[in-house]
């Protein structure tokens, strides 16, 4: 239907100054993304200059019908890879009309932590490895898998190439370019161990922007799978049995860790994380107990362990960090369905602010 | 069929001054849009400079066979998003050869009301939220719904993203850009609560132009669904049961309402609307009784009630209007199949001209 694509691809910059802004927010479940669009009279590049908006919170489980307005505060702007031109995506968070963050608004508290002077001084960097699984529409079985059956066991699929080893690369590659176009700091992609599962990485991003960028990258991914006719899932253990789960390993460093002597700072930080293991696990994603079993490159959910180059540990430190005496570490516990605002701010809070 | 699209997309400006004008009018049912095209010798941007035309009213239920000519008076020009170049869409209304508006011509009376000095002085603004449902061709069942069955219950679809939550976005997004290209004041779009249902907003538009713009936006939408092979429905309650209906909420303000002290003017206006509830309801769309049940974010059709931020009321005043002490209000009673000429002029008449 090229006539339809002629219209979808109309470049309005030729005829109008007007710009379309797609406002994005997180719905009542904490994982459902929502968005709607509005016309602005001219291009905008500063989120502070965008108007606040509102939506029907009673339709997203975030407000009662008799008092349904929830206010959207624009927080970050990205270029819209779908509408292109001067059109934009706007990541927002949600407030009551009185100006209080609604309960599902996790960004607000994260922003507070990230603006604490001690945290600001440490310039926390994040690199998040977002894994996800693609499922066939209707049957909700992974793409490329035979209906009612299973593919050959894991082995050939990690970073694999070929029609029998890589399922859905067109989605992954479109997403990669779309994110770069949008201005999301996407650093790479790879095919994962379970067939039909993929990973992209966002970062390094500083403080609150890590959360903004992961959420917008997730939004772009869900719009892309919508176009492709495929279901996107962030479930941490989509298929039971000898199949890998999906995580959101969070790589982390502070200024002190990146400087000389950083390895000692890293070890102290990991010690803090160990003491708060239960609290972190509780915030690291629903259903994570199905994934963190101690098998399939995970550490058991009740155990905290760390090690250099150890993919079976809760926290892994890279050999290059050990050799250099400074660098970063990888928290492998977060599930694919974690809220990056929660996880990033909690890691910063525990390692910088919290005293045992 | 790239050869066909090469032809459709021919840019005639290279070889001729001639343009094509698509004359659009409302047919005998009051909801069926009709159009036909003619060649003009050069570009035209002023409707009063366009020639009047005529059509066979006996084929649209608007004239008898022995005296079938109905005259089209051009009223508004928009750029043609399908033919592009200098080609235009022309919104018309219909008259007898003697110059009388035919019975289905609702624009004529609306234009009279909007040119009344008291109404002109109040500069009435309208923002209309047009909801509509997309149906699979032939079976007339909503797109994305399984044949012979139902999707999961309402909840995930409002502003939803993803192949299992948003059905038909390419139509909606083409329509958005096509309308902006055409010069329609389209304010935004969003996915609605019932899957397969969407909404676009036209406005703010002043006086009679609200009706012109909404009708042309509807025309562009029906041309786009025609391209996409999908059926467009403005039925106010397309599916019985626990599924939302489709409305055309009409947001409204006058100069007095927008000025300081406007909130009192708003309350008086709502008071008058309450006294003429039955008359308005009779003009607010066929079949509205199936939609205005008191459930699914509507107020019962026999009840008139208003409230701030209350989506279960007949009239809703936004929290920002309440806070600022001036602004606008939303009449939530009109069904998706209203005639915007009738509704907008009636609201203006009741609130500005009518004395209780």
Image: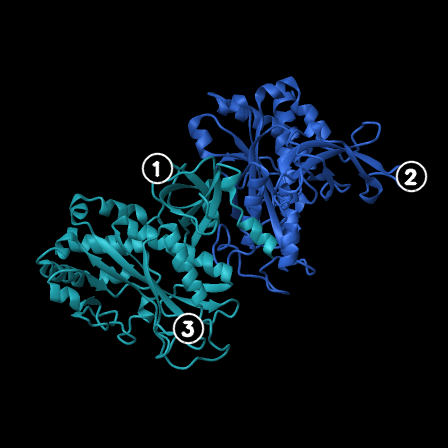
Chain colours: A cyan, B blue
- Whether callout 3 and callout 2 share a subunit is answered no
Label 1 lies in what chain? Answer: A
Badge 1 local density, few (<14 within 10 Å), some, or many (20+)? few
Label 2 lies in what chain? Answer: B
Q: Of label 1 and label 3, which has the lower sequence position?
A: 1
The residues tagged by marks 3 and 2 sit, at their Cα atoms, a distance apart of 69 Å
Residue picked out by circle 3: A166
- Whether callout 2 and callout 1 share a subunit is answered no
Q: In which quarter of the image is the C terminus of chain B?
A: top right
Q: How many numbered tags mark residues here?
A: 3
A313 relative to B134 in the view: left or right: left
Q: Which of marks 3 and 2 is in front?
A: 3
Residue lying at 75% horizontally and 31% vertically, measured from the top left: B51
Label 3 lies in what chain? Answer: A
Location of residue B242 in the rendering, given as x and y in whole percent from the top left corner: 58, 54
Mark 2: which secondary structure? helix
Badge 3 vs badge 2, beta-carbon distance below 8 Å: no
Residue picked out by circle 1: A48
Name the one closer to the observer, B291 or A116. A116
Residue B132 in sight from this viewpoint: yes
Q: Nearer the viewer, mark 1 or mark 3?
A: 3
A42 relative to B120 in the view: left or right: left
Location of residue A255 in the rendering, given as x and y in whole percent from the top left corner: 15, 52
Residue B164 in sight from this viewpoint: no
Badge 3 local density, few (<14 within 10 Å), some, or many (20+)? many
A177 relative to B134 in the view: left or right: left
Residue picked out by circle 2: B66
Location of residue A182 in the rendering, given as x and y in whole percent from the top left corner: 39, 51
Q: In which quarter of the image is residue B149?
A: bottom right
């Amino acid at each position: 239907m090229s006539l339809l694509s002629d219209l979808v691809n109309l470049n309005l910059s030729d005829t109008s100054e007007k710009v379309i802004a797609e406002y994005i927010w997180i719905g009542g479940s904490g994982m459902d993304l929502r968005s709607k669009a509005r016309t602005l009279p001219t291009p905008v590049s500063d989120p502070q200059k965008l108007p606040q908006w509102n939506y029907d919170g009673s339709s997203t489980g975030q407000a009662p019908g008799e008092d349904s307005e929830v206010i959207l505060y624009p927080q970050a702007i990205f270029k819209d890879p779908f509408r292109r031109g001067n059109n934009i995506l706007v990541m927002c968070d949600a407030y009551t009309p009185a100006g209080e963050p609604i309960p599902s608004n996790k960004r607000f508290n994260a922003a507070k932590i990230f603006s604490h002077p001690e945290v600001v001084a440490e310039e926390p960097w994040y690199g998040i490895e977002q894994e996800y699984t693609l499922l066939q529409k209707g049957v909700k079985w992974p793409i490329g898998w035979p209906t009612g059956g299973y593919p050959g066991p894991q082995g050939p699929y990690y970073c694999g190439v070929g029609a029998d080893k890589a399922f859905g690369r067109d989605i992954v590659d479109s997403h990669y370019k779309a994110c770069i176009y949008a201005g999301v700091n996407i650093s790479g992609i790879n095919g994962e161990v379970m067939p039909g599962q993929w990973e992209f990485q966002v970062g390094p991003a500083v403080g609150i922007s890590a959360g903004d960028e992961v959420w917008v990258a997730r939004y772009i991914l869900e719009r892309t799978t919508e176009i492709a006719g495929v279901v996107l899932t962030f479930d941490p253990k989509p298929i039971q049995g000898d199949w890998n789960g999906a995580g959101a390993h969070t790589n982390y460093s502070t200024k002190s860790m990146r400087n000389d002597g950083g390895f000692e700072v890293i070890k102290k930080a990991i010690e803090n994380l160990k003491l708060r293991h239960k609290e972190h696990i509780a915030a690291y994603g629903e259903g994570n107990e199905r994934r963190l079993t101690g098998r399939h490159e995970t550490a058991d959910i009740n155990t905290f362990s760390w090690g250099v180059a150890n993919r079976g540990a809760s926290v892994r430190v890279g050999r290059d960090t050990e050799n250099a005496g400074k660098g970063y570490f990888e928290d492998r516990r977060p599930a694919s369905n974690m809220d990056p605002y929660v996880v990033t701010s909690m890691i910063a809070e525990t390692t910088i602010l919290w005293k045992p």
